[in-house]
Amino acid sequence: MTFYIQKEIIEHLETDVRFRGGLAFSLGVVDRAIYNFILKYKEKPFANSNLTKKAALEYFRTEGYEEDQVLTQEIPVF
């Protein structure tokens, strides 16, 4: 299956440094890697990215997001 990240999650990651930093820690990357990913994703959303990995989904769950609030099968429009 093909999954994309919901627009609201991308916007939250872009504006909330703590949220972005927590995700970066969960994935074992630096904050800047997540920010660069966001910029690239907003230009042209792509499916099945690092943010659809189990570690990322677990992080989103700890932040109060259910899987259906994070993932979509429709290409988000920015």
Image (cartoon, grey):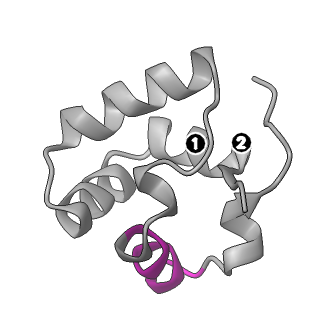
Q: Which residue is mark 2?
A: 7
Report the side of 66 relative to 48 (left or right): right
Q: Is residue 58 left or right of residue 7?
A: left
Point out which mark residue 52 bears: none
Q: Position of residue 6 (x, y in %)?
A: 71, 50
Q: Give yes or no for residue 58 being in the magenta stretch.
A: yes
Q: Which residues are magenta?
A: 56-64
- Eyeballing the image, is 43 above or below 6? above
Numbered disc 2: secondary structure: helix
Q: In the displayed structure, would residue 27 be above or below residue 50? A: below
Give the amino acid type for the residue marked by disc 2 in the picture. Lys
Q: Which residue is mark 1?
A: 10
Query: Which quadrant would the N terminus be assigned to in this image?
Result: bottom right
- Is residue 26 found left or right of 43 in the rendered image? left
Q: Is residue 50 magenta?
A: no
Q: CA distance from mark 1 to mark 2?
A: 5 Å
Please state the horizontal and vertical placement of residue 32, each as a whole percent of the image. 21, 32
| Place of residue 2 in the rendered image (x, y in percent of width and height, measured from the top left) | 71, 54
Q: Nearer the viewer, residue 56 or 64?
A: 56
Q: Quadrant of residue 78?
A: top right
Query: Which residue is drawn at the image coordinates 54% and 28% (left, top)?
Result: 41
| Three-letter code, disc 1 | Ile
Q: Residues at badges 1 and 2 in contact (C-beta under 8 Å)?
A: yes
Chief secondary structure of the magenta portion: helix
